[in-house]
């Protein structure tokens, strides 16, 4: 079972990831992330820092995804493990649709075509939504902004996320990221337990 966490920078996904590690320990899930679950992620970090050409950057994110699937996600799923990834394919669809605007025709379709047929579509995606100003306020505390972390970009990224969710509503659970950390962690943990329970009973049938 594959669960992903998505949302603009500053929505608290990474904090949640840590909280879930504790509250779901008995299910022995594998916690992972994009970018950077493999060494390919080092080139992605460099690409982000150096602000290289957007096509190169997008393809490095996709390469990181391919390596992540091959070396981390597929083996864990094959063992029957629950995999929880902080960011996954929807990050490309939401962010690179913005960075590739005017660079390639129909960026979202281009990105989806790059993934279709070999990626694994998550069973459930938790999408964290909050006002961009509040997200940026939270990011202020952090040093070294990435080039994505600008208001006009994050507004578009969040809009893209909502459109992607609207096109595939059965996969998405939308979370109000302004709610308290503990309340969110409790809700998400309970939802994952429920999904894990129903997927086990489906397999038994
Ligand atoms: P992340 O590691 O989640 O952020 P942080 O360094 O703040 O923990 O992701 C780094 C940045 O990369 C973030 O701004 C989102 C962006 N990103 C994309 O643009 N496309 C992608 O496919 C992924 C996975 C991340």
Image: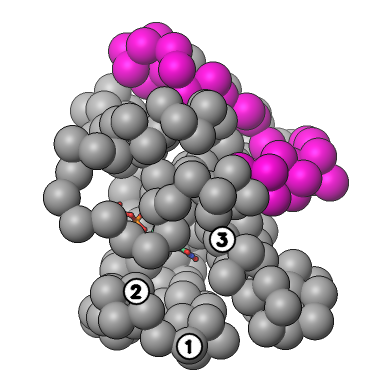
Q: Which residues are magenta?
A: 158-185
User: Residue sitting at 34 percent across and 74 percent down?
Assistant: 48
User: Residue sitting at 50 percent across and 34 percent down?
Assistant: 132
Q: Would you place residue 79 above or below residue 185 in this image? A: below
The answer to whether the residue bearing label 1 lies less than 8 angstroms from the nearest atom of ligand 1 is no
Q: Which residue is mark 1?
A: 53
Give the mark nearest the N terminus, 2 or 3.
2
Q: Which residue is mark 2?
A: 48
The local secondary structure at tag 1 comes to loop
Residue 158 image-quadrant placement: top right
Q: Which mark is residue 95?
A: 3
The answer to whether the residue bearing label 3 lies less than 8 angstroms from the nearest atom of ligand 1 is yes
Residue 40 image-quadrant placement: bottom left
* Whether residue 22 is visible: yes
Report the side of 14 relative to 107 (left or right). Answer: left
Q: Which mark is residue 142?
A: none
Q: Would you place residue 50 above or below residue 163 in this image? A: below
The local secondary structure at tag 2 comes to helix
Proximity of marks 3 and 1: CB atoms separated by less than 8 Å: no
Measure the alpha-carbon separation of dots 3 and 1: 14 Å
> Is residue 159 magenta-colored?
yes
* Whether residue 171 is visible: no
Give the mark nearest the N terminus, 3 or 1.
1
- The location of residue 137, given as percent across then percent down, is 32, 31
């Amino acid at each position: 079972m594959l669960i992903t966490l998505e949302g603009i920078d500053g929505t608290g996904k990474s904090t949640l990831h840590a909280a879930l590690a504790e509250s779901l320990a008995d299910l022995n899930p594998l916690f992972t992330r994009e970018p950077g679950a493999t060494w390919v992620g080092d080139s992605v970090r460099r690409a982000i820092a150096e602000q290289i050409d957007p096509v190169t950057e997008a393809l490095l994110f996709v390469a990181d995804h391919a390596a992540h699937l091959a070396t981390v996600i597929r083996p864990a799923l094959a063992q029957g493990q629950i995999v929880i990834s902080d960011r996954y394919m929807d990050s490309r669809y939401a962010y690179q649709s913005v960075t590739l605007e005017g660079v390639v025709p129909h960026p979202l379709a281009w990105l989806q075509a790059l993934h279709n047929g070999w990626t694994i579509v998550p069973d459930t995606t938790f999408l964290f939504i909050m006002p961009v100003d509040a997200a940026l306020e939270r990011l202020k505390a952090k040093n070294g902004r990435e080039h994505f972390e600008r208001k006009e970009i994050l507004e578009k990224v969040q809009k893209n996320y909502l459109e992607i969710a609207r096109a595939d509503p059965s996969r998405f659970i939308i979370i109000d990221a302004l709610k308290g950390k503990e309340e969110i962690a409790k809700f998400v943990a309970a939802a994952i337990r429920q999904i894990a329970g129903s997927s086990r009973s489906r397999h038994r049938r």
